[in-house]
Image (cartoon, coloured by chain):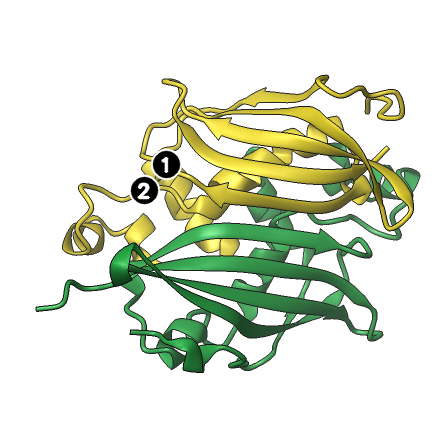
Chain colours: A green, B yellow
Amino acid sequence: MVDQSAVGRTFTPVTASVEPGRLRYFLNTIGETNAVYRDPKAAKAAGYPAIPIPPTYLFCLEMMDAENPFEFLTELDIDLSRVLHGEQGFAYHVPAVVGDVLTFRSRVTDVTDKKGGAMTLIGVVTEITRQDGVHIADMTRTIVVRNPKAS
Amino acid sequence: MADTSSRLVGDRVVHKTFAPITRHTLALYCGASGDHNPIHVDLDFARKAGFPDVFSHGMLVMAYLSQALTDAVPPNSIRSFSTRFAAITQLGTRLTCEGHVSELVDHNGEPCMKIALVAKDEAGEVKLVGEAVVAR
């Protein structure tokens, strides 16, 4: 079971490119038709240097370009089939746009046992910086681990 | 895009309904999101993990909620966006995403509004509860 010793653990940084083709596939999947995400002219008219990404897409970029998208689970010896997503947050400082190359750096912020050890909540924060070093956003997530019953 | 400068507490600003979530949606989202957790696409894996069937990625539901949000406000006006995944979203769910202005606030000296967000299924069961801080 994951314990307090996991707090402060960091993981391999992930660098991801915001590519228009992959972004269109995501937009098509969720039926997103908003012109600002599809038409460079509409994006420029709305004040962006290029097409912006939808609010949750930062989470996808990190998973798509990670060498091991579940490194965090492997490293903490957590079984993927016992994991649920509890909470997710984003704080945006500068809009991410097509053409950006972003680096994601994650660290464990807290580990909390719930329901007498039946579940463990793990908090992870991810700092996101752009190729020019600008800190553009932060992600926070809470992962819920359904612990096996003690035998 | 609607003018967001005159919004009042209680105003319903976000409302959108979505087509049912199918196995095909989950397969596409698996590839589109990079989240290849088999629990969302592989029935055998889901059953072994103790679930009756595959179920939606929480982040797919959050992506629908964010689509409803940016139908109402420009993406670059969103300062923060967070959700709690309250219940598993099953196959076939037709989501309704709603949001109302819950508070007018200052965020690092900038006039903003908090929008209380929710994603529900057709029976009214809450799947996601969220909040966005948006410049006004």
In the displayed structure, A9 sits above or below B115; it is below
Amino acid type at mark 1: Thr
Q: Which residue is at a point 73% across and 41% down the rendered structure image?
A: A37
Q: Quadrant of the C terminus of chain A?
A: bottom left
- Percent x, y for residue B95? 46, 26
Q: Are marks 2 and 1 in contact (CB under 8 Å)?
A: yes
Q: Secondary structure at mark 1?
A: loop
Amino acid type at mark 2: Phe
Who is closer to the viewer here, B18 or B78? B78
Q: Which residue is at a point 68% across and 61% down the rendered structure image?
A: A138
Query: Is residue B78 left or right of A12 when viewed as pictured?
Result: right
In the displayed structure, A22 sits above or below A7; it is above
- Percent x, y for residue B20? 40, 26
Quadrant hosting residue B70: top right
Who is closer to the viewer here, A134 or B45? A134
Q: Which residue is at a point 36% across and 36% down the rendered structure image?
A: B89
In the displayed structure, B51 sits above or below A65; it is above
Query: Is residue B115 left or right of A40 when viewed as pictured?
Result: left
In the displayed structure, A25 sits above or below B86; it is below
Q: Disc 2 is attached to a residue of which chain?
A: B
Residue of label 2 = B55
- Percent x, y for residue B35? 44, 58
- Can residue B34 be seen in this snapshot? no
Residue of label 1 = B89
Q: Secondary structure at mark 2?
A: loop
Q: Disc 1 is attached to a residue of which chain?
A: B
Q: CA distance from mark 2 to mark 1?
A: 6 Å
First in sequence, mark 2 or 1: give its number: 2
